[in-house]
Amino acid sequence: MKSEGKCRSCNARMLWTETERSKIMPVDPEPSPQGNVLLIARPGNLPLSVVLTRDELNAVKENNGVHWRFGMKHDARQLYVAHFTTCPQGKQWSRK
């Protein structure tokens, strides 16, 4: 599966990602100040999307944009938003 795509509902550009629970999740392609999704590149695979909790977001701010996950340091200064939250028809697609 290609990571770039378009929403079938609103035709917006988006990225296909895979969550930590191996679910496919669409993400808006540009970083957002309201973002809570950290994207981790994985060559040959879809990017991994890690949804940060409020406590993790606060820790990122306190640590100058650094987030530790899987024993590795990640740059979390650019966070993204799940497309479900910005798509006008997002509620019909979201499976929480």
Image: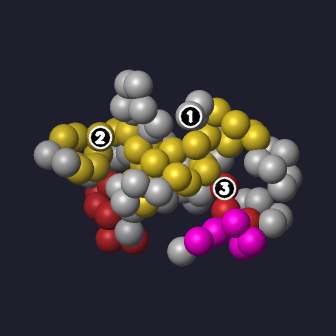
Q: What residue is pinned by disc 2?
A: 74
Please give the name of the residue rendered at 64% of the width and 33% of the height, measured from the top-left corner: 4
Q: CA distance from mark 3 to mark 2?
A: 22 Å
Instruction: Specify the quadrant that holds the C terminus.
Output: bottom right
Is residue 79 a member of the stretch shown in magenta?
no
Amino acid tagged 1: Met
Residue 9, compared with residue 74, is above or below; it is below
**Disc marking residue 16:** none
Residue 43, compared with residue 5, is above or below; it is above
The disc, 1 or 3, on the residue closer to the chain's N-terminal end is 1
Which structural element holds mark 3?
helix
Residue 67: x %, y % from top left: 28, 49
Asked if the residue at tag 3 contacts the one at tag 1, i.e. Cβ–Cβ closer than 8 Å, the answer is no
User: Which residue is nearer to you in this view: 34 or 93?
Assistant: 93
Q: What residue is pinned by disc 3?
A: 83
Residue 74: x %, y % from top left: 29, 40
Q: Which residues are magenta?
A: 91-95
Q: What residue is pinned by disc 1?
A: 1
The residue mark sitting in front, 2 or 1, is 1
How packed mark 1 is, by other alpha carbons closer than 10 Å (few <14, some 14-19, many 20 or more), is few
The residue mark sitting in front, 1 or 3, is 1
